[in-house]
Amino acid sequence: MDSRADIQITKIDNTHIKVDADESIKRELSDYFTFPVPGAKFMPSVRNKYWDGNIRLFAQTTGKLYVGLYYALEQFAKDRDYNMEGYQWETDIEYPDFTDGLNMGFPLRDYQVDAVTRGIKYRRQLLVSPTASGKSAIIYCIARHFISMHKKRVLVIVPTTSLVEQMSKDFADYGYDRPIDKMYGGAKVGDTDIVVTTWQTLSKMPKSFYDGFGAVFGDEAHLFKAKVLTGIMEKMKDIGHRWGLTGTLDDTQTHKLVLEGLFGPTHYVTTSADLMDEGILAELDIQCLVLKYPPEVSKEVVSMDYPREMEFLAGNEKRTQFIKNLTLGQKGNTLILFQYVDKHGRKIYETFQKSGIKSFFIYGGTDTINREKVRELMEKEEGCVIIASYGTFSTGINIKNLHNIVFASPSKSKIRVLQSIGRVLRTSKDKVNATLFDIADDLSYKKKENYTLRHFKERINTYSKEKFKYTIHEVKF
């Protein structure tokens, strides 16, 4: 190692760098880039002492570290007065006026221009920007610039087949008149400049598939914490331009650092609160309806474990009728989100069907074409109800003509909550306001609280942090 440098960095490929330093510094680095996995103590591998529940992003034996964590490494050295030599972060020339020549039919907002400019300059970024802030437009502009400058293909990864169709349609709406390969369900890839696909499809592809691609976008990048997605990104040894985009991030440091490692440092583009203040997003009114159950019911349920409590709520016909009556009292179109398909979602749907209400049932088994038909229908009609699983409709689906959303199943996941809220925030010619009905269940008895009531309190914390306005109403049940 160079005697002048405490830390010497060598680029291995476009996924990893090698960090060479004294063993004492490597131990410090190992501690610095080691974080506990939330909930790990409940995992069998930890309980059986096969694993300590930590993620280690720096390999002390090999010195390997994700390229995207270069800035975190730089901060580590700065805080300890260590000097670094060797590989440095690569940047491109800025082109602030590039988007003017794309003829997209509308001007980019200032924060979008800033995100595009930063993305182009730094080659790798994790861009955090909420729903309806125009993430697909940001992807489109960076992709067009990359193709024009580097003459290489671009890969866009989205979480669902519905989003493959939607992203491709967005690009066409922005004026892109060339073919786009939509890769899912066995479709073969041609030689187009842009390929849009899902992580599930890529999980089956060999390393050789990525030959010829020079850039990758990970839309809804918060889903890239799964091991299979990490494996996909690590196969892209020759892809040096990487951008992750998402509306939300977990509060856990592990999650953020893994994503930064795969893509690059985080840049917060804008916030939902700012977009609401500017009138870009619909003004959100959150009505929290806390169902207060009788003591004899609460006494029985509060002693249940989480799965049994969820079964109780899903099978509660009175609760299902409450959701139906609540929905019927609203104007415009409504999205009802559930967690369990057969135990809950299908029962809600059947209740609406018996009442002759125009309703649609969407879950993992609904094919992409039918999902897209429902989405298009909702844009044109009023008084429709979509009963959908969180997995299919909480992320990425755009419906401007959606006025209300109902959380029929409880969730404490910040990502799921914020992404679900995002479904209702887009404005339209006749829509400037939106309502979320958060249904919570108070089955506490004496001093003991039930699981889903605790999850409700976590959602309240999320609303407060995001500066959303909310009102809590207790409903005797």
Image (spheres, rainbow, N blue to C red):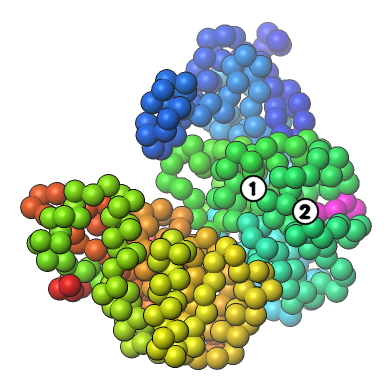
Q: Earlier in the sequence, mark 2 or mark 1?
A: 1
Estimate how packed mark 2 is, as few (under 14), some (14 to 19) or many (20 or more) residues with alpha carbons within 10 Å: many
Q: Position of residue 119 (x, y in %)?
A: 69, 52
* Residue at point 42%, 30% (across, down): 44
Count of residue discs: 2
Task: Give SS at disc 2.
Answer: strand
The x and y percentages for residue 258 are 56, 38
Seen in the picture, residue 355 relative to 458 is either above or below; the reply is: below
- Residue 410 can be seen, yes or no: yes
Tell me if mark 1 has few (under 14), some (14-19) or many (20+) residues whose alpha carbon lies within 10 angstroms of its own: many
Against 283, is 5 above or below?
above
* Left or right relative to 474: residue 202: right
Q: Residue at x 43, y 41 (%)?
A: 252
At a point 15% along the width and 59% down the height, the residue shown is 298
Question: What residue would you read off at disc 2?
Answer: 155
Q: Which residues are magenta?
A: 149-156
- Does any portion of residue 284 appear in the rendered image? no
The quadrant of the picture occupied by the N terminus is top right
What residue would you read off at disc 1? 125
The residue nearer to you, when weighing 353 against 18, is: 353
165 is higher (above) or lower (below) than 44:
below
Q: Nearer the viewer, mark 2 or mark 1?
A: 2
Q: Tell me if residue 47 is in the magenta stretch.
A: no
**Residue located 47% across and 23% down the image:** 51
The image shows residue 289 at horizontal and vertical percentages of 25, 71
Q: Along the horizontal axis of the image, is 430 left or right of 181?
A: left
Where in the figure is residue 109, as x and y percent of width and height? Answer: 61, 70
